Image: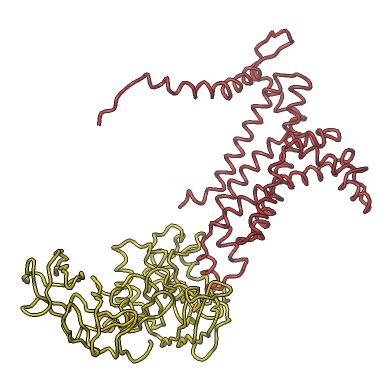
């Protein structure tokens, strides 16, 4: 049980990183509370697995420190950190039974056999493995094997945190939901810190209390799923989270206000001055609506997404998406669009304009 | 769907059939033919039934050769397999040393077998060979052409030198195919290096080791060239393995009948033993 603190963490796989791009992980300061459920979300290659391996001790960071509570564990090997990890591909010891697999971490640590039996029985019941305890682990299906991996982490009483590295990759789609609910349920029962790495927003948003969104070796936002959706701090978050993602449209800045397609727009934030590089407005398709006044637009395409229709429209020379409830009327050809001001934001160089501080 | 029946298609198989017939069936049948007949020369043959088989199976000479063969094969298996696994475990997994090690390992396998025999023959000569002379110089009374023990020692050393690489290469292939996650999980589970070997590396190497053991068994049971060049079966008959004995009977004494019967028994022994090996080693998987 521990609070995990990452302090000024940086990592490069190169011996002598010169360029900013040589860093797999750029400067990182994070604090994770004991017992929380966290997700690390980002596209492939954003550094989330690197970060996970640094926390578990499989990798030593080039710079910075990792603290469990107040103990510096930066240079400790994995077995001394009291960490459990579930990998992308199920790792089971093929020649052992399910029971022996679950008992393995305890036996390696010299726990007495009576205690081992008690723990294994308890964890097997939690992970629905009781009926299979006597079976050879090699004979199980992928989800069964992942449960064993998870069970090996849960069985130890000294575990500070359980780390998941895209654990549902090889699981059949119809079992993914089940296993995810199981994880959530287990988290509530054992209240251990769990860190879940994924590139799937559904997995991250349903599992975690707090999501850490990463992009190219950098944390772009940390927040609850609602915060990520309602107040993206970076265009990347807006685009990566939500389906379809946020509309990001280039604009001009005039006296701190956004000007798009020749019109001055009311927005939730103001820009101090125009940026040299990029000035954009971000608005989610949920927050754009057809109205009688507003921006001139042309409907290009309508796709049915079940309870919603996704309308692709052209406005001011740019393409944007609008979400319209099923049954609501969609104008054909020319229309007028309105952005809801409270949910429309100005982004400069990718970041939310006027944001208080870096995450 | 209607299948077209065209019996003429069988002609397409004919070339393969002829090839197999000429390089396997015909020679084998010739041997079978010799094994049931007696001849006194002039190409005149008499029916002999299974008497050659009975003779061979009862002959002490065959028993001794078979005994020597089994001793040789099991000794080299007991040395080469564990040694090969140990070397494979010690080899680097990354970096430029990988190719250096692999090339070094493959070297003995590239040398023609009679050259291996000739090399060791000279290498071990007590008066001029590096090995023989050194052993004598440091006080061992070593002479493989006269002393049985020394002949066996040299023979086994030569085979270990020649063939351990094969086990190493196969075991190494098995080792590098183990995903990193297994080692990482074992670290996190606090496994000792012995536990990692016992529960991860060995099970993952099982298939390639099965193949390695089978190959080494069959090859060593058939071995002829190297011991023939090294010791010629001597001193006396002490290193006369089955194949050397067979050649002596067939080409030295020109006893075609007994030699043919012996070849067939030899063949069946290898077949039977390979089957036993394979069944025992793959029993676990069949049970699942």
In depth, the one of A341 and B143 nearer the eye is A341
Q: Position of residue A146 (x, y in %)?
A: 41, 66
**The color chain A is rendered in:** yellow
- Determine if residue A280 is in view: yes
Q: Position of residue A45 (x, y in %)?
A: 42, 69
Q: In this view of the protein, which residue sits in the foreground, B93 or A20?
A: A20
Q: Position of residue A203 (x, y in %)?
A: 32, 72
Considering depth in this image, is B33 or A269 the residue closer to the camera? A269
Q: Could you say which is closer to the camera, residue A101 or residue A228?
A: A228
* Position of A40 relative to B223 (above/below): below
**Which quadrant would residue A232 be assigned to in this image?**
bottom left
Q: Quadrant of the C terminus of chain A?
A: bottom left
What is the quadrant of residue B155 in the picture? top right
The image quarter in which residue A48 lies: bottom left
Residue B210 relative to residue A146: left or right = right
Q: Is residue B268 left or right of residue B227?
A: left
**Vertically, is A138 above or below A356?**
above
**At 42% from the left edge and 86% from the top edge, which residue is drawn?**
A32
Tell me what residue is drawn at x 39 percent, y 61 percent: A142
Residue A144 shown left or right of residue B237 in the figure: left
Rendered location of residue B149, percent (x, y): 85, 44
Q: Which chain is red?
A: B
């Amino acid at each position: 049980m521990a609070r995990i603190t990452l302090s000024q963490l940086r990592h490069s796989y190169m011996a002598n990183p010169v360029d900013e791009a040589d860093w797999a992980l750029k400067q990182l300061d994070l604090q994770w509370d004991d017992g929380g459920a966290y997700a690390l979300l980002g596209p492939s290659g954003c550094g989330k697995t690197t970060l996970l391996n640094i926390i578990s001790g499989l990798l030593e960071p080039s710079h910075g420190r990792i603290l469990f509570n107040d103990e510096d564990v930066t240079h400790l090997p994995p077995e001394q950190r009291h960490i459990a990890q579930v990998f992308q591909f199920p790792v089971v010891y093929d020649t052992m039974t399910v029971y022996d697999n679950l008992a393995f971490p305890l036996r390696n640590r010299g726990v007495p056999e009576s205690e081992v039996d008690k723990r294994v029985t308890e964890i097997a019941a939690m992970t629905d493995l009781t009926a299979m305890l006597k079976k050879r682990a090699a004979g199980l299906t992928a989800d069964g094997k992942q449960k064993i991996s998870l069970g090996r982490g849960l069985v130890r009483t000294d575990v500070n945190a359980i780390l998941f590295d895209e654990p549902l990759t090889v699981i059949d789609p119809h079992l993914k939901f089940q296993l995810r609910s199981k994880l959530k349920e287990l988290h509530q029962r054992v209240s251990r810190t769990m860190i879940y790495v994924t590139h799937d927003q559904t997995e991250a948003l349903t599992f975690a209390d707090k999501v850490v969104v990463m992009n190219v070796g950098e944390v772009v936002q940390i927040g609850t799923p609602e915060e990520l959706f309602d107040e993206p701090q970076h265009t990347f978050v807006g685009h990566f989270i939500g389906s379809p993602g946020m509309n990001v449209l280039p604009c001009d800045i005039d006296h701190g206000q956004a000007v798009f397609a020749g019109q001055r727009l009311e927005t939730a934030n103001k820009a101090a001055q125009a940026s040299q590089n990029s000035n954009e407005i971000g608005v989610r398709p949920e927050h754009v609506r057809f109205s009688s006044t507003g921006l001139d637009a042309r409907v290009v395409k309508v796709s049915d997404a079940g309870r919603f229709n996704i309308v692709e429209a052209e406005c001011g020379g740019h393409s944007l998406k609008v979400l319209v409830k099923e049954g609501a009327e969609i104008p054909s050809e020319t229309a007028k669009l309105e952005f809801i001001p409270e949910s429309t934001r100005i982004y400069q160089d990718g970041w939310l304009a006027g944001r208080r501080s870096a995450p | 769907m209607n299948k077209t029946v065209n019996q003429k298609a069988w002609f397409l198989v004919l070339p393969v059939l002829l090839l197999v017939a000429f390089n396997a069936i015909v020679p084998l049948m010739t041997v079978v033919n010799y094994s049931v007949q007696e001849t006194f020369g002039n190409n005149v043959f008499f029916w002999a039934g299974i008497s050659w088989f009975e003779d061979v199976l009862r002959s002490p000479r065959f028993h001794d050769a078979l005994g020597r063969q089994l001793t040789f094969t099991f000794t080299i298996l007991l040395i080469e397999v564990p040694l090969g696994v140990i070397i494979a475990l010690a080899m680097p997994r990354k970096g430029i040393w990988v190719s250096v090690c692999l090339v070094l390992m493959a070297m003995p396998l590239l040398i023609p077998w009679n050259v291996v025999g000739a090399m060791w023959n000279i290498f071990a000569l007590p008066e001029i060979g590096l090995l023989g002379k050194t052993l004598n110089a440091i006080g061992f009374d070593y002479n493989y052409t006269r002393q049985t023990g020394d002949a066996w020692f040299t023979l086994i050393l030569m085979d270990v030198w020649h063939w351990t690489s094969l086990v190493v290469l196969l075991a190494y292939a098995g080792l590098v195919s183990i995903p990193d996650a297994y080692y990482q999980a074992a670290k996190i589970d606090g496994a000792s290096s012995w536990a990692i070997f016992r529960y991860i590396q060995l099970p993952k190497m099982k298939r390639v080791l099965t193949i390695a053991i089978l190959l080494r068994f069959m090859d060593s049971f058939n071995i002829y060239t190297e011991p023939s060049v090294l010791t010629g079966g001597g001193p006396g008959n002490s290193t006369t393995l089955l194949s050397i004995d067979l050649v002596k009977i067939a080409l030295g004494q020109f006893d075609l009948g007994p030699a043919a019967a012996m070849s067939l028994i030899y063949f069946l022994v290898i077949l039977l033993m390979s089957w036993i090996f394979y069944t025992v080693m793959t029993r676990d998987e069949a049970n699942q």
